[in-house]
Image (spheres, rainbow, N blue to C red):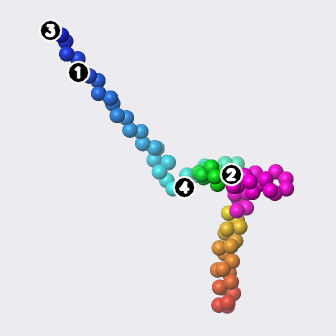
Amino acid sequence: MANYVEPQRPRIIVRLAPLWRHNTFVNTVVSEGKVRQNLRLDPDLWSAIDTDRAKRPGNISRNTWITEAILDKLARQAAPNQNARDRNA
């Protein structure tokens, strides 16, 4: 009589991301009091940023370009609010 060997069932291992990854904002303080944040963008958007950077004189980093873009956006959003306050004063 042949020995019956039950086939091995594959073990399913589920690895969940660490809890700190579930937070919306995960910041790591780096030198000079600045905070590091990862940014995930489509490759097409990175290409568009790099194309725009290449048009400017000198060598501008992606970090500088993105920082300037954020500051421009914040200034545009603050401008209508400032104009409304001036009209109501």
Label 3 – label 2 distance at C-alpha:
68 Å
Badge 4 local density, few (<14 within 10 Å), some, or many (20+)?
Answer: few
Q: Is residue 52 magenta?
A: yes
Please tell me whether residue 50 is drawn above or below residue 17 in the rendered image.
below
Between discs 3 and 2, the one toward the N terminus: 3
Mark 2 in CB contact with mark 4 (< 8 angstroms): no
Q: Which residues are magenta?
A: 47-69
Badge 3 local density, few (<14 within 10 Å), some, or many (20+)?
Answer: few
Which sits in the foreground, 69 or 50? Answer: 50
- Residue at 23% in and 21% down: 6
Left or right: where 56 falls relative to 41: right
Label 2 – label 4 distance at C-alpha:
25 Å
Residue 1 point in image, percent of width and height: 14, 8
Secondary structure under the numbered disc 2 in the rendered image:
helix
Badge 1 local density, few (<14 within 10 Å), some, or many (20+)?
Answer: few
Please tell me whether residue 16 is drawn above or below residue 59 in the rendered image.
above
Between discs 1 and 2, the one toward the N terminus: 1
Label 4 – label 3 distance at C-alpha:
64 Å
Q: Amino acid at mark 1?
A: Glu
Label 1 – label 4 distance at C-alpha:
48 Å
Q: From the image, tell me which residue sits under label 3.
A: 1
Label 1 – label 3 distance at C-alpha:
15 Å
Q: Is residue 64 visible?
A: no
Secondary structure under the numbered disc 1 in the rendered image:
loop
- Residue at 66% in and 52% down: 46
Please tell me whether residue 80 is drawn above or below residue 61 in the rendered image.
below
Q: Quadrant of the C terminus?
A: bottom right
Secondary structure under the numbered disc 3 in the rendered image:
loop
Q: Is residue 43 visible?
A: yes
Q: From the image, tell me which residue sits under label 1.
A: 6
Residue that protrudes farthest toward the right in the picture: 57
Between discs 4 and 3, the one toward the N terminus: 3
